[in-house]
Image: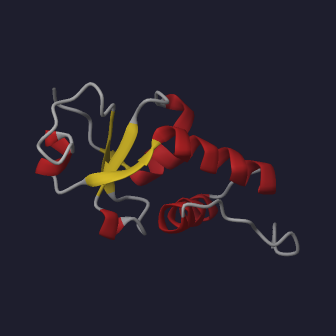
């Protein structure tokens, strides 16, 4: 099965368009760019190699990044804090969660500035 190559911005801006069972695969060293390529795959319904990485993701040099349900939660958490989410905030919140396994908490005094 050939999956559609996507960009990080597509996944972050519309996380609810994916199934909760899906996962994001990308180059972990290239997450700072919204236009970085990625794949969204259901890890339980694709062929995997001995490392349990989907073969198509591994062929592109991608690794497991986060479950889509985590990305949905990141988006919801940020929306609860700021209302209208800006892409740069979303990328920062995504990278914060990826690096720390924790939601980013914004200073209420700087929201909207």
The answer to whether residue 69 is above or below residue 64 is above
The answer to which quarter of the image holds residue 90 is: bottom right
- Quarter occupied by the C terminus: bottom right
Give the camera-side residue of 76 and 45. 45
Taking the image as shown, residue 110 lies to the left or right of residue 14, namely right
Taking the image as shown, residue 80 lies to the left or right of residue 35, namely right
The answer to which quarter of the image holds residue 89 is: bottom right
Taking the image as shown, residue 41 lies to the left or right of residue 53, namely right
User: Residue 77's spot in the image, x, y percent?
Assistant: 71, 50
The answer to which quarter of the image holds residue 56 is: top left
User: Residue 19's spot in the image, x, y percent?
Assistant: 46, 27
User: Residue 2's spot in the image, x, y percent?
Assistant: 17, 31
- Quarter occupied by the N terminus: top left
User: Residue 6's spot in the image, x, y percent?
Assistant: 33, 44
Give the camera-side residue of 19 and 6. 19
> Hey, which residue is sitting farthest right in the picture?
109
* Residue positioned 46% across, 44% down in the render: 11
* Residue positioned 65% across, 58% down in the render: 86
Residue 14 seen in the current view: no
């Amino acid at each position: 099965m050939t999956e559609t190559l996507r960009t990080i911005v597509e996944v972050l801006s519309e996380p609810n368009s994916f199934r909760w069972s899906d996962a994001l695969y990308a180059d972990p060293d290239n997450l700072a760019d919204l236009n970085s390529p990625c794949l969204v795959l259901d890890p339980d319904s694709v062929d995997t190699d001995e490392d349990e990485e989907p073969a198509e993701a591994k062929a592109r040099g991608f690794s497991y990044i986060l479950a889509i349900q985590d990305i949905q939660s990141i988006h919801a958490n940020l929306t609860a804090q700021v209302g209208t989410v800006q892409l740069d905030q979303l990328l920062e919140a995504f990278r914060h969660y990826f690096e720390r396994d924790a939601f980013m908490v914004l200073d209420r005094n700087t929201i909207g500035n």
